[in-house]
Image (spheres, rainbow, N blue to C red):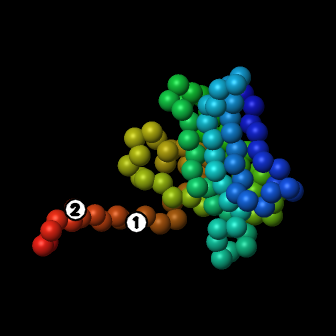
Amino acid sequence: MHILDRDPDCDPAPYWFVALDGEEIAGFALCHPEMSEDPEMAWVYVVGVRPAWRRRGIALALLRHSFGALYHAGKHKVSLEVDAENPTGATRLYEKAGMHVERRQETFKKELRPGK
């Protein structure tokens, strides 16, 4: 398994990390170091692992690699949002990576119909 990342010295854009198994993409993490009013805060947009590669520690390795790269960029905090009812066990993954719940929020929806 190899983890590739964009060179932060050459590209100030979001940090993208890809886990490869041979030539197959097994997973990825998309991060950005400049998404908060707090100059020490970075953001993890998404972490994803393809189904055939799940339960092998790839997502945790991607998170840890991301945290290290973001720390190297001067960030001392990282945040993300997750669907707490995600069936893949994402909340357990984030807790295993040392993260904790800061707040919970509810999302409301309504189907719109003519005249309603």
Residue nearest the observer in this picture, 17 or 60: 17
Could you tell me which secondary element the residue under label 1 belongs to?
loop
Residue nearest the observer in this picture, 35 or 101: 35
Please provide percent x and percent y for residue 30. 64, 50
Q: Which residue is at a point 40% across and 66% down the rendered structure image?
A: 105
Label 1 belongs to which residue?
105
Residue 37 tag number: none
Q: Residues within 10 Å of mark 2 (few under 14, many from 20)?
A: few
Could you tell me which secondary element the residue under label 2 belongs to?
loop
Q: CA distance from mark 2 to mark 1?
A: 20 Å
Please provide percent x and percent y for residue 103. 47, 66
Q: Amino acid at mark 2?
A: Glu
Residue 111 tag number: 2
Please indicate whether residue 27 sits to the left or right of residue 11 in the image. left
Q: Amino acid at mark 1?
A: Gln
**Label 2 or label 1, whichever comes before in sequence order:** 1
**Residue most extreme to the right:** 9
Looking at the rendering, which quadrant does residue 18 occupy?
top right
Q: Residues within 10 Å of mark 1 (few under 14, many from 20)?
A: few
Please indicate whether residue 8 sits to the left or right of residue 86 in the image. right
Please provide percent x and percent y for residue 33. 71, 62
Q: Which residue is at a point 14% across and 72% down the rendered structure image?
A: 116
Q: Which residue is at a point 69% across and 48% down the rendered structure image?
A: 16
In this rendering, does residue 62 appear at all?
yes
In this rendering, does residue 77 appear at all?
no
